[in-house]
């Protein structure tokens, strides 16, 4: 007799004799883990009875069996004549192990069949097989409750660690901006950070500046660029690091001292733990595989960046909203699994440009429901000068069409422009607006305090009382309890 049958009967017999055991077994097994089809049907029916708060006995199991999952009197009798086991959990684990082995055997068959399919691209086959293997490996992962004593002691240890660091505001990955660090305390392990903006606002530049700061503080960075080649990203990072105009770097128009500075910067960047994947196609399963691999080889990886989320490919032929939902949820799970913050760039809907105030809001996120739900922090990048220049250009073109050749644009381009980082959501901290300065020539954002103009920081803290908001000035403390 197949060894699995008596083990399955022993577990089901234990449930018939003591229905309270079902809850513990249900944490280990699902119906499909049973090898013998009638046993699958019986276990599924037991779960149905448990949810309905009905007795789990021979009569009710037979009564609630469905046409698609039939159960016979003989099946029940074979179970009831089997002696129940006391260590039912060990037997349940055996059933789960058998189930996993069957899935692996089936997976091996899929590998053989897929490798012989000449009509499918090799990369598509690999993606499919990685997805299937991930499902098998995670099929039985389940966290358990942690007792109050364990959680409270772990929390106290965390507070003591922070106290030993000297009450510093920065406890996560340095964002590179003092005002943003003060608002967020840095990007924490497992955080999903969304950086969103309309085109030309500088969101890629912002995250490159953040990545550079992570590198400067000894952390490794994995950068997935779906839109821009790795060389172009490096040009921007070198421009920001050397203060050499990006346009001059592109054409090699450098003076001797600039060549010297560039050479030093290239040497430093060459030794930095920066890893760039600039493939144009990326699924959530590929991302997970690549990040696991690079993290295992380089444990110093402390930040991952995806530029950008809407360019990632979904699995199957599902609705795009469902695909984005799967991607955003997957990013959050990967961040928690690898214990690193993940920054994902996102586009905004064009509709915001029809408003008088074009500052972004959460509702402007494309496929905003899932992204807004999964993100721990959502940052919007806004530069008013971009719209002013655009508006003036449209007015000038309209004047020319009307025959007014004397109209001259009032917009005066500046090398440094005011920029706003709007914290639209922060799961563990305040929301508000931070003023930075964008230095266009070297594609770099800096704190307003480091520029000639020093705009104030506007912070809106969401208090515990409903509909109450308090504005803080730069001199006020924001060390209030986080909601």
Image: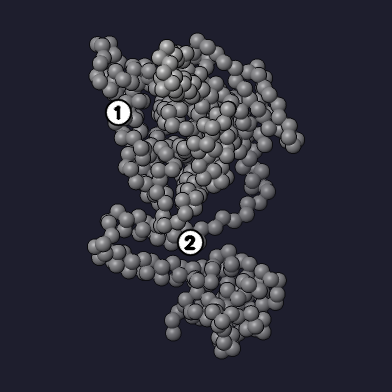
- Asked if the residues shown at circle 1 and circle 2 are in contact, with their CB atoms under 8 angstroms apart, the answer is no
> Picture coordinates of residue 386 (x, y %)?
46, 23
Q: Quarter-wise, where is residue 119 in the image?
A: bottom left
Give the farthest residue toward the bottom. Answer: 74
Q: Quarter-wise, where is residue 47 in the image?
A: bottom right
At horizontal 51% and vertical 45% (from top left) the residue drawn is 367
Binning the other alpha carbons within 10 Å of mark 1 as few (below 14), some (14 to 19) or many (20 upward) gives: few
In the image: residue 385, left or right of residue 84: left
Mark 2 lies on a secondary structure that is: loop
> Picture coordinates of residue 181 (x, y %)?
55, 26
Count how many numbered circles sit on residues in the image. Answer: 2
472 above or below 41? Answer: above
Q: Which mark is residue 270?
A: 1
Question: Which quarter of the rendering shows the N terminus?
Answer: bottom left
* Mark 1 → mark 2, Cα distance in angstroms: 41 Å
> Picture coordinates of residue 220 (x, y %)?
39, 34
Q: Which mark is residue 139?
A: 2
184 above or below 310? Answer: above
At horizontal 64% and vertical 46% (from top left) the residue drawn is 151
Q: Quarter-wise, where is residue 363 in the image?
A: top right
189 above or below 20? Answer: above
459 above or below 18? Answer: above
Question: Which quarter of the rendering shows the C terminus?
Answer: top right
Is residue 337 or residue 61 the one in the foreground? 61
Is residue 379 or residue 81 the one in the foreground? 379
At horizontal 49% and vertical 68% (from top left) the residue drawn is 96
Give the farthest residue toward the front. Answer: 403
At horizontal 49% and vertical 46% (from top left) the residue drawn is 328
Q: Which circle's residue, 1 or 2, is located before the other in the chain?
A: 2
Mark 1 lies on a secondary structure that is: helix
In the image: residue 235, left or right of residue 316: left
């Amino acid at each position: 007799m197949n060894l699995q049958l008596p083990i399955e009967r022993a577990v089901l017999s234990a449930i018939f004799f003591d229905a309270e055991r079902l809850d513990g077994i249900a944490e280990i097994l699902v119906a499909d883990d049973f090898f013998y089809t009638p046993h699958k049907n019986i276990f599924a029916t037991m779960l149905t009875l448990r949810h309905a708060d009905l007795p789990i006995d021979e009569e009710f199991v037979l009564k609630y069996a469905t046409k698609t999952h039939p159960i016979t009197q003989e099946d029940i009798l074979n179970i009831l004549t089997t002696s129940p086991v006391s260590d039912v959990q060990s037997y349940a684990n055996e059933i789960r192990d058998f189930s996993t082995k069957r899935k692996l055997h089936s997976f091996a068959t899929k590998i053989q069949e897929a490798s012989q399919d000449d009509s499918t691209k090799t990369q598509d086959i690999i993606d499919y097989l990685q997805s299937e293997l991930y499902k098998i490996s995670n099929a039985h992962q389940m966290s358990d409750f942690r007792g109050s004593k364990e959680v409270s002691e772990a929390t106290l240890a965390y507070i003591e660690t922070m106290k030993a660091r000297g009450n510093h505001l920065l406890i996560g990955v340095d964002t590179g901006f003092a005002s943003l660090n003060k608002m967020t305390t840095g990007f924490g392990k497992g955080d999903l950070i969304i950086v969103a903006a309309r085109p030309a606002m500088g969101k890629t530049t912002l995250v490159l500046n953040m990545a550079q700061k992570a590198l400067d503080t000894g952390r490794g960075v994995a950068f997935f660029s779906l839109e821009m080649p790795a060389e172009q990203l490096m040009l921007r990072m070198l421009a920001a690091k050397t203060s050499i105009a990006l346009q001059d770097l592109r054409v090699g128009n450098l003076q001797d001292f600039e060549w010297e500075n560039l050479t030093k910067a290239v040497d430093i960047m060459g030794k930095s733990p920066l890893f760039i994947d600039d493939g144009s196609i990326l699924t959530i399963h590929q991302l997970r595989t690549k990040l696991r691999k690079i993290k295992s080889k380089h444990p110093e990886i402390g930040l991952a960046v995806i530029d950008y989320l809407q360019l990632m490919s979904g699995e199957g032929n599902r609705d795009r909203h469902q695909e984005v939902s799967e991607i955003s949820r997957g990013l959050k799970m990967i961040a928690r699994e690898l214990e690193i913050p993940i920054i994902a760039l996102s586009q905004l809907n064009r509709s915001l440009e029809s408003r008088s105030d074009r500052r972004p809001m959460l509702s402007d996120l494309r496929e905003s429901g899932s992204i807004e739900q999964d993100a721990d922090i959502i940052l919007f990048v806004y530069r008013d000068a971009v719209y002013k220049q655009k508006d003036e250009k449209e007015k000038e073109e309209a004047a020319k069409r009307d025959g007014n050749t004397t109209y001259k644009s009032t917009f005066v381009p500046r090398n440094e422009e005011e920029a706003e980082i709007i914290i639209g959501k922060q799961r563990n901290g305040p929301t508000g607006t931070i003023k930075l300065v964008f230095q266009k020539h070297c594609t770099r954002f800096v704190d307003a305090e480091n520029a000639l103009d020093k705009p104030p920081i506007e912070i809106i803290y969401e208090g515990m009382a409903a509909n109450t908001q308090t504005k803080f000035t730069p001199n006020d403390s924001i060390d209030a309890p986080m909601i």
